[in-house]
Amino acid sequence: MVRRVSIFGATGSIGQSTIDLIRRNRDAYQIVALTGGQNIDRLARDAIDLNAQAAVTSDPARLEDLRAAVSGHQIDVSAGADALITAAQRPADWVMSAIVGAAGLAPGIEALKHGTTLALANKESLVTAGPLLMAEARAHGARILPVDSEHSAVFQALVGEDIAAVEKVIITASGGAFRDWSLDRIATATPEQAATHPNWDMGQRITIDSASMFNKALELIETKEFFGIDPAQIDVLVHPQSLVHALVGFRDGAVMAHLGAPDMRHAIGYALHWPDRRDLPVERIDLARIGQLQFAAPDDTRFPALRLARDVMDTGGLSGAIFNAAKEAALDDFIARRIAFLDMARVVEQVLTDLSGDRRLINAAFTLDNVANADQIARVKAHEVAARLNG
């Protein structure tokens, strides 16, 4: 049976890995929609090659470029945020949500409204609006499958298990580009240095988030929202080899560890083929050759993002949306060289401090409008804080 598939964020690393797997068995899939941002050439090339029904760029200014790039092919083209929503309304059996940032929330929710299986690589959706996302899935009989390697690992370790028997969930972190750097050296890090990952091949923003541990901070919150686990039961370990993606400890003392090569096609393939397991073109690990695995506790002094994530989980409400928006704004300012690397955490912490007292904002109902409002307020505040630090 041919499965109808849409890929949101098709031109990024997750989207390209998804397309790689689909190309290996292309007769099994019908591509409904591919979406991207600025990489029009790649978006058009993939849409043509996979005979997609629709291709969407998030940038309205690039619409004519996209139209020209697919000229001569029967592919519907459109652009902008509304076009992403319309693409999510196209009937599909399986949707990859891999748009980076809060922009991925609305299309993901729209897809769930149609009872689609949503493969979720956009962690920001759960961080900003976890209760809303999970409620939409329940209301429409849709299923969310995790694609982050850590949460896919936890999901797999829990197959056949009672969540009530879980004592501890441990997600691992590579430590990013600066795991062995001194605090003084980290303080002078450039965007180029932060965008180089020792293990994973990812986009610029995610790689810098890995270096600051903000990526792992988001994943802490994501773990709570997806699995409904108390924050006190969630830990992070730094694991430089990136072979153990997560561990689940049970009340009888047993610990289940998920191991695999650092290749996102593993988690993507698991979600694509679920509930079956299929052959995947990923490296098989050789433990005898590896010899040993290293683990260490994260350093909250060098990486305060994890502490801030725990504050967010304690506060609840829309604090996750504020946290993510402040993080994205601070990252923009770091990439633009307006603030230093360590200033990103300072910006986020100040925004959380400034806005946590606004209970009407924090405790507003989980709706797209309220999440978007909190997001916008936090972004403006973050840029103001960054400007003060820079001034």
Image (cartoon, grey):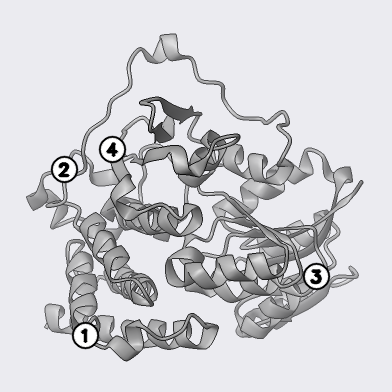
Q: Quadrant of residue 28?
A: top right
> Element under label 1?
loop
- Tell us which disc is closer to us: 3 or 4: 4
Counting from the top left corner in percent of width and height, residue 263 is at 53, 37
Mark 2, residue position? 181
The answer to which of marks 1 and 4 sits earlier in the sequence is 4
* Disc 4: which residue: 238
Q: Is residue 155 left or right of residue 27?
A: left
Within 10 Å of disc 3 (Cα), the crowding (few <14, some 14-19, many 20+) is: many
Q: Is residue 363 above or below residue 110?
A: below
**Residue named by callout 1:** 357
Residue type at tag 1: Gly
CA gap, disc 2 and disc 1: 36 Å
Residue 348 position, x and y percent, is 24, 71
Disc 3 versus disc 4: distance between alpha carbons?
A: 41 Å
Q: Are marks 3 and 1 in contact (CB under 8 Å)?
A: no
Q: Residue at the spot x=76%, y=45% of the render?
A: 22
Mark seen at residue 54? 3
Q: Residues within 10 Å of mark 2 (few under 14, many from 20)?
A: few
Residue 372 percent coordinates (x, y): 47, 84
Q: Nearer the viewer, residue 153 or 96?
A: 153
